[in-house]
Structure formats: C-alpha cells, structure tokens
Amino acid sequence: MAYFWYFLFYSFFGYLLEKIFAYVTKSERQVRKCFLILPLCPVYGLAMTALLFAGAERIDNILALMVIGAAVTTSVEYAVHWGYETIFGVQFWDYTPTKMDINGRVCLPFSAAWGVLSAAAVRLVQPELHALAATLGVEWASAAMFLLTFDAIITARVLLVYHDTELLSLRALRRRRTAET
C-alpha cells in the first residue's frame, strides 16, 4: 500500500512542479495535469515509484543515485509518453525543440533534471513520505483509490473522445460541451 501513496504524493508534487515551471516560463499552456479533476501528473508518480521499487533508497553514492534516477525516470517518461500517444492520441509534452530529444518524448536537459530531482526526492522527501504513508490506514487508501479510479475513467473518456489535453479542466470541458450544443 505504501507504493500507492508514493505514486499519489509524487504525482501531486509533479503537478506542483509543473505549475511552478509554467508560471516561471510564462507558458501558454497552463493546464499542467493529466487528470480532469485531481491535481496529479502521474508520470512523476510512476517514475518515482519505479525508482523506489528498484531500490534507490539503498544507493549510497549520490552521483550513482542521480545517474540511476535519470535512467529510470527517463525510461518511465518515454513509456508514459508512448502510452498517451498510442492509447489516447495525445501528447502532454513535446521536447523536439530542444534538439537533444528522442522522438520528442524525452530529452537530455530534462533527463539531467530528473536525475537531480530524483536524488533530492530519495534523500530529502522520501524519508518523510515513508513515515506519512505508514500512518495512513486502509480506509484512506480505499477513498483515494475510488477517487483516482473515478477520475481516471472520466479523464480517459475525455481524451478518447476529444484527443485534447487542454480539456482537462472542468471549465474548458464545459466550454467545449456548451459550444457543441
């Protein structure tokens, strides 16, 4: 059950990081989540969960942790991007402008950032999250799983019907549906 909480927490932290990045870079694209209702970016949750599952907490050398963190999280990022494209026909990100990318799905600058972020998360955040996850009971996990599943189903429907990530806000979706009627 702890890995479920890690997935949720890191997905939420990823959402916050994406919002900060959009604000700092003055991005035109302000919808920075991958679910319709919940403020989550699952690529962050999946990447960190994979890294933790691979035993990152047992790696003592910080440089090795950054390299392994970059490799694991970049691999997850590539797979998630491929999945979004293949299943839903959408792209949440496109790194082709960096010119150091692989199919626009991953790129060297963000892989380096993943390495630093993952090492910081394993060393600084994970001990606290581990302690917090241990205190959350089954009833909280059941409620969180229900909300996540409900939102995932609705989100999948929106993406399959519209193939538009910008509709992952209730306001934008409402405007689109109003325009259709």
Image (spheres, rainbow, N blue to C red):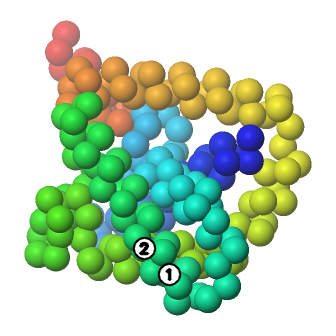
Residue 155 percent coordinates (x, y): 39, 28
Q: Which mark is residue 152?
A: none
Between the C-alphas of marks 1 and 2, the distance is: 6 Å
Q: Which residue is mark 1?
A: 66
Task: Work out whether residue 30 can be spotted.
Answer: no
Which residue is at the far top? 181
Q: Residues within 10 Å of mark 1 (few under 14, many from 20)?
A: many
> x, y percentage for residue 170?
40, 31
Where is residue 37 shown, x and y percent of the image? Answer: 49, 34
Camera-side residue of 86 and 165: 86
In the displayed structure image, the side of residue 54 where residue 127 appears, left or right: right
Of the pair 49 and 28, the residue shown nearer to us: 49
Q: Residue at x 42, y 22 (%)?
A: 154
> Could you say whether the residue bearing mark 1 is in a helix, strand or loop?
helix
Residue identifier under label 2: 70
Residue 104 occupies which quadrant of the picture?
bottom left
Left or right: 111 as drawn, with respect to 63:
left
Q: Quadrant of the N terminus?
A: top right
Q: Residues within 10 Å of mark 2 (few under 14, many from 20)?
A: many
The residue nearer to you, when weighing 28 against 89, is 89
- Image vertical order of residue 154 relative to residue 123, above or below: above
Q: Secondary structure at mark 2?
A: helix
Q: Amino acid at mark 2?
A: Ala
- Residue 17 visible in the current orientation: yes
Total number of numbered discs in the rendering: 2
Residues at discs 1 and 2 in contact (Cβ within 8 Å): yes
Q: Tell me the residue at 75%/60% (across/down).
A: 129
